[in-house]
Amino acid sequence: MVKEGDQSVTLDLLKQKMAEFARERDWDKSHSPRNLLLALVGEVGELSEIFQWKGEVPKGLPDWNEEERVHLGEELSDVLLYLVRLSDICGIDLGRAALRKVQLNALKYPVSLSKSASSKNQEWRNFTRWSIYGNAFDMITILFGEKCRYRFI
Ligand SMILES: [Mg+2]
C-alpha cells in the first residue's frame, strides 16, 4: 500500500496508485493498451475544450477564476494518469523514456542553433531541413556514439 503524506509525487507513485485503483475495481481486464490510449485521447479532448474559443491565454492564467483552475488541474491529471497507466500496461518505464527523449531532443535541437532565433533563422532552416532524418541520426548516435553521428550529416 502506497502512503501519501509527506511523500513527493513521482511517476512510480502514480503508477502504483493507478494499478491499485484498477485492481480494486476489477478494471484490469478492460485496461488494454488500445482502451487506455482511446481514454487518453478522450481526456486530451476534454483538456482542449477548456481552452477552446478562448484565443491566446497568457502564461499563469491571470484572468482565470479558482473554479476554472481546479477544472484545468483535473483534466491535466486525467491525461497524466491515463498516460502513466498506458505506459505501465505496455511495460514502458515512462520516467526513463522521458529522460532519454529529452537527451535526444537536445541532440536534435542544439542550443547553439536555438539562441538568437532571428539571426539564426537561415541556419535553423538549413538544420531543420535535415530533421526528417533526425530519428535515424538519433539512432546512429545511440548505437555508435556522437562522433559517428556527425559523419552521416
Ligand atoms: Mg476528464
Image (cartoon, helix red, strand yellow):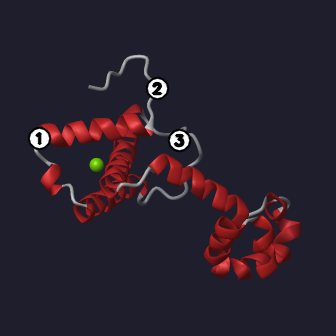
Tag 2–tag 3 contact (CB < 8 Å): no
Q: CA distance from mark 2 to mark 3?
A: 25 Å
Camera-nearest residue between 78 and 18? 18
Q: Is mark 2 within 8 Å of ligand 1?
A: no
Q: Quadrant of the N terminus?
A: top left
**Image quadrant in which you'd find residue 152:** bottom right
Give the amino acid type for the residue marked by disc 3 in the picture: Leu
Query: Which of the two discs, 2 and 1, labels the residue nearer the N terminus?
Result: 2
Q: Which residue is mark 1?
A: 25
How packed is label 2: few (under 14 Cα within 10 Å), some, or many (20 or more)? few
Left or right: residue 31 compared with residue 113? left
Give the amino acid type for the residue marked by disc 1 in the picture: Arg
Q: Which residue is mark 3?
A: 61
Q: CA distance from mark 2 to mark 1?
A: 26 Å
Camera-nearest residue between 140 and 125? 140
Q: CA distance from mark 3 to mark 1?
A: 36 Å
Camera-nearest residue between 58 and 115? 115
Give the amino acid type for the residue marked by disc 2 in the picture: Ser
| Label of residue 8 in the image | 2
| Label of residue 90 in the image | none
Where 92 sits versus 71, above or below?
below
